Image (spheres, rainbow, N blue to C red):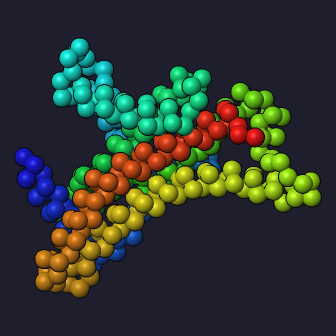
Amino acid sequence: MRRVLFTISLLALALPGQAFARGDFDPTQEFEQHEWVPIHIGPLDLSITKAVVYLMLGSVLTMAFGIVFMRWRLKVEPDTRQTFGEQIYEVAETQIAEQGLPSKAIGRWFPYVASLFLFILVINLIGFIPLPITGETWHHIPVFGIYAATSSLSVTLALAALTFVFTHVEGIRWNGPTRYFKSWIPDAPKPLLALIVPLEILGQIMRLISLSVRLFANMLAGHILILTFIGLMFILETVILAPLVIPVATAFYIFEVVIVVGIQAFIFATLSAIYIGSAIEPQH
């Protein structure tokens, strides 16, 4: 079964739908968002695109993962399924929540950072599973392709915005607005405060930007590298390069799935926990 799935994955990677359609290949067009179901409410564009579909699928799979591995038929002597779920739970608890959140806030914010970690992990993983829902067709037949919702900046920015809002809401809730915002101002001579305060405010905004761009850039770069190497065969219109580009693309594919997918989910959730924790217990 694993060999069959691996073979299908390689074929899906080696035969992009756009290459079928045009005889050429532009990897950047794989990330364009087109309206599948137009929904416009005044100035708001709530149309369903492939990113939305992948997010919906990721949400369902994340909930299913939690139920199957962490809630369903738990035993005193855990089997392989339950052990795997407990390991994921332990990583979220000990390596993410306890490292970034103060003990008094773990009960409140552990569910958020754990859900964030699991959701991004699932979204990243399905982004490397060839599925016929990327919008690409060959003679009106959907073709398999890879696409990660987290390679869209609007998706990662929305996730980062949640952490950004929760960070400052919790900072104000625990410390009061005066004490919280005063914690942004370090001990420094008054003449320097006019320079330091704007920089501190900019630093808070940069947290939002860096959190979203880090995940977006890593997922986008990984997919573009894979698609670019495969696309060389279609750009040059020759299969002679296949023995070279397919192994290289496969190596990038394995690297992204085995290492980048999990690390990026872990980093995003960990930084979210650290930001919220530092707002609850400011250092100065």
Residue at the spot 71% in from the left edge and 27% down from the top edge: 174
Work out whether residue 270 or residue 163 is closer to the camera in this orientation and state it.
270
Q: Quadrant of the C terminus?
A: top right
Q: Is residue 258 above or below residue 114?
A: below
Q: Is residue 24 above or below residue 260?
A: below
Q: Is residue 283 above or below residue 128?
A: above
Give the x, y percent position of residue 6: 13, 55
Work out whether residue 49 or residue 106 is closer to the camera in this orientation and state it.
106
Work out whether residue 253 or residue 90 is closer to the camera in this orientation and state it.
90
Residue situated furthest top in the rendering: 76
Q: Is residue 120 left or right of residue 162?
A: left
Q: Is residue 156 left or right of residue 120?
A: right
Residue situated furthest right in the rendering: 191
The mark total stands at 0
Q: Is residue 250 visible?
A: yes
Q: Is residue 34 visible?
A: no
Give the x, y percent position of residue 131: 24, 52
Residue at the spot 13% in from the left edge and 77% down from the top edge: 243
Give the x, y percent position of residue 253: 26, 61
Work out whether residue 228 or residue 251 is closer to the camera in this orientation and state it.
251
Residue at the spot 46% in from the left edge and 37% down from the top edge: 96
Query: Which image quadrant is residue 177 in?
Result: top right
Q: Is residue 140 above or below residue 158?
A: below
Residue at the spot 62% in from the left edge and 51% down from the top edge: 207
Give the x, y percent position of residue 239: 14, 80
